[in-house]
Image (cartoon, rainbow, N blue to C red):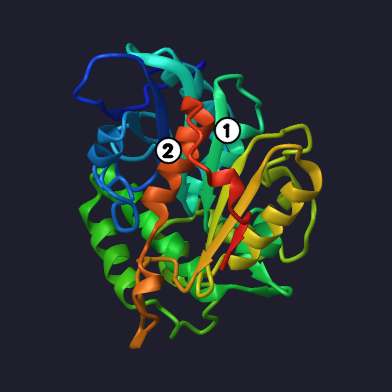
């Protein structure tokens, strides 16, 4: 597809084998569409087998999509364009839902802020809704390990896409052993040298909740959608998941459900480190999302709204 400013965004599309019209499930992510977040979700072919057209899209400047990647900056307009495009795919019923965790969770919220009529529900997982307080800083302290690791990871992928093997290898090596030995660890030389345009530099300079963060964070004041919120007790962004859920409960007229399991950011399973939380901690999210999507995209009464809105 092409965005309103004529940038091509690439996607893989998975379809049910049977004929007919089906709702669309859209995931927009920056890590390569072939991965499709299968570290935590079932493969898109499984979702297609449940009677959905599944679209896994590389965001602008990532994977094989065109354009320049600039953290979150294009996700509002590109998200709206992608939803409108997905709703009009051949075989689409016109109803669109979104799912995904982390950055893929944030792309849902940015897209929802435009209120596209085809978007009926979203399932954001493990997000930092307020980028300052939920993602970059905690109690005013810069989240150095998480932010630095992520910045190097994204910078390495940028170098790979551009074909700069030397820069890629240097950044990839640093991502495996974060450079905390610099004279000032929060100002790593490797990012100064190889990724001077990284978001990291802005994040560390804006150490107060100023207008920079307000302009970066999505605004959902006029948005009201049913949402399934997903978090993990050991996830770095748990407070963002909880804060966003509470805000939506206070403002929304539509159902808001929350599930939190004993999971880290990834993977989602019964074990965290050496601790085994038992069979009940196994990841139930794929089946839960299908029940949620069946209700809101297909009009099937799955009984999900008769259950407690909070599961811990």
Is 180 drawn above or below residue 107 in the view shown?
Answer: below
The structure residue drawn at horizontal position 53% and vertical position 45%, both measured from the top left corner, is: 304
Say left or right for 149 vs 210: left
The structure residue drawn at horizontal position 25% and vertical position 25%, both measured from the top left corner, is: 15
Q: Secondary structure at mark 1?
A: helix
Disc 2: which residue: 28
Rendered-image quadrant of the N terminus: top left
Pointer 1 and pointer 2: residues touching (CB < 8 Å)?
A: yes
Is 9 drawn above or below residue 292 in the view shown?
Answer: above
Q: Secondary structure at mark 2?
A: strand
Say left or right for 160 vs 289: left
Disc 1: which residue: 111
The structure residue drawn at horizontal position 33% and vertical position 71%, both measured from the top left corner, is: 174
Q: Position of residue 237 (x, y in %)?
A: 57, 65
Q: Which mark is residue 273?
A: none
Earlier in the chain: of badge 1 and badge 2, it is 2
Judging depth in this view, the residue of 233 and 32 nearest the camera is: 233
């Amino acid at each position: 597809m092409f965005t309103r400013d004529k940038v091509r965004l690439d996607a893989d599309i998975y379809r049910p084998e049977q004929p007919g019209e089906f709702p669309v499930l859209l995931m927009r992510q920056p890590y390569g569409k072939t991965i499709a977040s299968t570290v935590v979700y079932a493969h898109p072919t499984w979702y297609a087998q449940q009677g959905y057209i599944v679209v896994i899209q590389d965001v602008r400047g990532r994977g094989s999509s065109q354009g320049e990647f600039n953290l979150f900056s294009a996700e509002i307009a590109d998200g709206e364009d992608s939803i409108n495009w997905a709703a009009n795919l051949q075989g689409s019923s016109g109803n669109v839902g979104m799912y995904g965790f982390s950055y893929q969770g944030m792309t849902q919220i940015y897209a929802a802020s435009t209120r596209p009529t085809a978007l009926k529900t979203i399932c954001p997982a493990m997000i930092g809704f307020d980028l300052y307080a939920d993602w970059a800083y905690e109690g005013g302290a810069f989240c150095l390990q998480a932010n630095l690791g992520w910045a190097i990871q994204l910078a390495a992928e940028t170098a790979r896409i551009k074909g700069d093997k030397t820069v890629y290898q240097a950044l990839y090596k640093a991502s495996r052993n974060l450079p905390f030995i610099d004279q000032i660890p929060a100002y790593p030389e490797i990012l100064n040298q190889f990724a001077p345009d990284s978001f990291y530099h802005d994040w560390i300079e804006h150490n107060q909740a100023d207008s920079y963060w307000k302009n970066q964070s999505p605004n959902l004041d006029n948005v009201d959608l049913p949402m399934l919120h997903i978090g993990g007790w050991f996830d770095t962004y748990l407070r963002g998941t909880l804060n966003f859920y509470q805000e939506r409960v206070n403002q929304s007229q539509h159902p808001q459900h929350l599930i939190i399991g004993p999971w880290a950011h990834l993977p989602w399973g019964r074990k965290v480190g050496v601790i085994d939380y038992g069979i009940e901690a196994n990841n139930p999210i794929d089946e839960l999302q299908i029940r949620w999507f069946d209700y809101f995209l297909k009009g099937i009464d799955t009984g999900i709204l008769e259950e407690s809105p909070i599961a811990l």
